[in-house]
Every structure is written in structure tokens, then in C-alpha cells.
């Protein structure tokens, strides 16, 4: 009997001849992941300047975040199965230059409507990277180091929220809102030759494998009774993460640009710490690890809402919240990958799609609440639901 009703000829992964060089692979993939995922968040500190330039409101420009996330999600569904068919390396070498061009094109926007359309295209273009990169790590990195590699790259997706917001906030007073996009485009273009140099050649794909067969796997994976709760938990995790960071900008939690910069940067050390601790954390089963960190995230944001802390304590609690998100994310990734078996590439495309949809909903969730405190209670409730979903998925796999 085939897993999830998928033909093994269409999904079986090739056996690599050797493992990828660990340090150079993780470094290159982590830096590229920061640039790619950071395009979602880079626009948040630019909203005020863009609104001034186009004589509109910052709230209406939240669609610049959402449009990118929608394109990002569409791209995952397109390129995840495509990477199974064409190979991880080939897709990345085609995708990164296109992503660079699409990122630079955003600077040509004459109106908010044009910017929203170009952000949608940009999201589709940069979506070539995450599913292909995660599948490559799961296949070609030494299994003893695989959890650390995946944790580093998934942490980079979160680090990007801090680094590119901070970078954009520092750049925009000096150069205007277009410069952060041009710098990002240059970085994406330069990452292509580096990744080409360090990636192992694609292994031959099975002759019987078809692109249509790869796409047919998606519904079976999405509605698999053990995987669906984990996809929902991933969706909720990203909704809460993006909503909190968007709300820092929308609700004027602080009127000082320096304090806002500090709040954004507060989570960076915590995100870096998680991959360092992963050799120890990985001793805990991936579903249990994801459940524990989701519960910590729920408790932390509820504590912020209940206590209205000072700026210093808010920064500390936000750092703990971000650490919890950074700990839960690789746990969900590993749990999904292990359950999907040979359909890993398509399963991780759906994992990335869940992240993108959550990123699209997050700004709208932030804008839907009247102030910061009610939003935090809402995020705490949803994070609790996510933890319960992972518990339910674990019981299903054991039944």
C-alpha cells in the first residue's frame, strides 16, 4: 500500500552519493532565507513614508504585506512539486535571479495599486527558494546534523522579520522607501552564484515521475488526518507572529523610533539561540517540542496583555515570545516531514504555504482589533488552539 495513495515511483527520493558540506550549506541557505522571507516584512517600516508619498493611509497599505504573502503562498504550491520534478538545485538557480528582478521592480510603482500588484508578483518569484531549500536539507544533509540545519534555516525566516525591518527603518530616512528593495534585489542576485557553488548536483529523478503526479499529491497531503492539524498549527503560529509585529507599527505602542527599533530587535538574540540549543532540544520528539513552545508563546502574549509592562519588560517578553515561535517552527517542520515520508517535497511546500497564508492573514488580524491589548489576548487564544491541534495530531499518529 502506498503512503497517502501516492505512487512511490512518483515521489521516492533519490539516495544521495554524499552529504552536502554542512557549514557552507547552512550559511548560504540561512543568508538567502533571510533575504527571501524578509521581503514580507521589509515593507512594514516603510508604510508611513509610502503613505505620505501616495497621500493615503498606512492602514490601507497593509495590503502590501498581504499581497506579497498571497503570491508567496501561490508560489509554494507551484514550485514545491516542481522542485520534486526538476531538482532542487536547478529550481533555485532559475528562481533566485527572477526573484531579484521582481524585487527591484517594486521600486517602479507609481501608485499603491501598482505596488500591490508588483508585490504579488514578487511573492510568487521568491517562493522558489523555501520549499526547494528545505527539501534539499532534508535529503542531502547528514542526518545527525539535519535538525540543526533545518532549525537554522527556519530560524532565518523569523530573523528576517527583525533584521529587514531594522535595516529598512535605518535606511528609509536616508534614502527613501525604494532603497531597501534595491539592496534586497542586489543581495538575491549575489546569492545565486554562491548557492550554485556549494550545492551538490541534482540526483536523477525517477523516470516515471511526472509533474502532474507531484501536484496530485497535494490534496492527499493537505487533508491527511495527521498532517492537517499540523498545517493548521503552522498557519496559526505565523498569523500570531506577523500580527504582533504589525501591531507594533499600527498601534503606536511607542512614539519613539529608537524604542520601536529596540522592540523589533529584541527577538533577534532569542531566535539565534534556538539553533544553538537544537542538539539538546532535538532529544524531545518534534510534536512535543512544537506543543511546548506554542504553549509558551500563548502564555507570554497573555502576560503582556494582562500586565501592560514597561518598554524594557515588553522587550524581554517579546524576546521570549519570538523564542517560542522559533522553537515551535522547526518542530512542526520535522513532524510534517516525518509523517509525509517519500512525499516530503510536496508536504514541505504545503508547510511553506501555511506560513505564507498565515503571513497574509496576520496584518489583517492586527488591523481588526481596536488596540494592542485585545489583539494580544486574541493571539494567546489562537496559540493555545495551535498547541491543542498538535496534541490531537500526535494522538492520531499513535492510534
Image: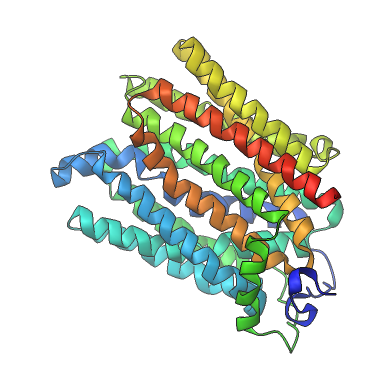
Q: How many labels does the image show?
A: 0
Q: Say which residue appears at 60% left-offset and 82% top-offset.
A: 212
**Which residue is most to the left?**
55
Which percent across, then down, holds residue 397? 81, 51
Residues 360 and 111: in front is 360
Q: In this view, does 361 lie to the left or right of 346?
A: left
**Which residue is most to the front?**
399
Which percent across, then down, holds residue 242? 47, 39
Q: In this view, does 188 lie above or below 37?
A: below
Residue 75 seen:
yes
- Where's the N terminus, which quadrant? bottom right
Q: In this view, does 100 lie to the left or right of 29?
A: left
Residue 273 seen:
no
What scheme was used to colour the molecule? rainbow
Q: Is residue 387 left or right of residue 147?
A: left
Q: Is residue 32 above or below residue 217?
A: above
Q: In this view, does 12 lie to the left or right of 313?
A: right
Q: Say which residue appears at 34% left-offset and 58% top-offset.
A: 119
Residues 83 and 31: in front is 83
Q: Is residue 180 above or below residue 163?
A: below
Which percent across, then down, holds residue 191? 54, 61
Quadrant location of residue 47? top left
Residues 175 and 229: in front is 229
Which percent across, then down, holds residue 110? 17, 58
Quadrant location of residue 17? bottom right
Quadrant location of residue 275? top right
Q: Say which residue appears at 67% left-offset and 49% top-offset.
A: 230
Q: Say which residue appears at 50% left-offset and 47% top-offset.
A: 358
Amino acid at each position: 500500500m502506498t503512503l497517502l495513495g501516492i505512487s512511490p515511483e512518483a515521489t521516492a527520493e533519490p539516495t544521495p552519493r554524499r552529504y552536502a558540506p554542512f557549514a557552507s550549506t547552512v550559511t548560504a541557505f540561512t543568508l538567502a532565507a533571510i533575504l527571501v522571507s524578509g521581503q514580507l516584512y521589509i515593507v512594514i517600516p516603510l508604510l508611513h513614508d509610502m503613505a505620505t508619498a501616495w497621500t493615503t493611509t498606512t492602514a490601507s497599505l497593509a495590503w502590501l504585506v498581504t499581497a506579497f504573502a498571497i503570491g508567496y503562498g501561490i508560489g509554494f504550491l507551484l514550485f514545491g512539486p516542481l522542485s520534486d520534478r526538476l531538482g532542487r538545485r536547478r529550481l533555485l538557480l532559475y528562481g533566485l535571479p527572477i526573484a531579484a528582478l521582481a524585487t527591484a521592480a517594486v521600486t517602479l510603482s507609481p501608485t499603491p495599486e501598482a505596488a500591490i500588484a508588483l508585490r504579488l508578483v514578487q511573492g510568487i518569484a521568491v517562493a522558489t527558494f523555501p520549499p526547494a531549500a528545505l527539501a534539499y536539507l532534508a535529503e542531502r544533509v547528514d542526518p545527525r546534523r539535519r535538525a540543526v540545519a533545518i532549525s537554522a534555516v527556519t530560524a532565518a525566516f523569523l530573523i528576517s522579520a527583525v533584521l529587514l525591518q531594522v535595516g529598512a527603518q535605518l535606511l528609509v530616512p536616508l534614502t527613501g522607501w525604494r532603497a531597501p528593495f534595491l539592496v534586497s534585489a542586489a543581495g538575491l542576485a549575489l546569492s545565486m552564484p554562491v548557492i550554485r557553488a556549494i550545492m551538490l548536483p541534482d540526483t536523477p529523478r525517477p523516470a516515471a515521475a511526472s509533474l502532474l503526479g507531484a501536484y496530485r499529491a497535494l490534496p492527499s497531503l493537505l487533508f491527511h488526518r495527521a498532517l492537517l492539524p499540523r498545517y493548521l498549527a503552522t498557519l496559526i503560529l505565523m498569523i500570531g507572529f506577523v500580527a504582533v509585529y504589525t501591531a507594533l507599527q499600527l498601534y503606536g505602542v511607542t512614539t519613539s523610533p529608537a524604542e520601536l527599533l529596540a522592540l523589533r530587535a529584541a527577538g533577534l538574540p532569542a531566535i539565534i539561540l534556538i539553533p544553538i540549543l537544537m542538539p539538546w532540544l532535538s532529544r524531545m520528539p518534534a510534536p512535543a517540542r512544537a506543543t511546548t513552545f506554542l504553549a509558551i508563546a500563548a502564555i507570554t502574549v497573555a502576560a503582556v496583555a494582562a500586565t501592560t509592562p514597561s518598554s524594557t519588560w515588553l522587550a524581554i517578553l517579546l524576546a521570549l515570545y519570538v523564542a517560542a515561535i522559533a522553537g515551535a517552527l522547526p518542530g512542526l517542520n520535522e513532524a510534517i516531514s516525518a509523517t509525509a515520508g517519500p512525499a516530503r517535497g510536496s508536504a514541505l511546500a504545503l508547510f511553506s504555504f501555511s506560513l505564507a497564508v498565515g503571513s497574509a492573514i496576520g496584518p489583517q488580524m492586527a488591523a481588526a482589533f481596536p488596540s494592542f491589548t485585545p489583539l494580544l489576548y486574541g493571539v494567546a487564544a489562537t496559540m493555545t488552539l495551535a498547541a491543542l491541534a498538535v496534541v490531537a495530531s500526535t494522538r492520531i499518529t499513535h492510534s
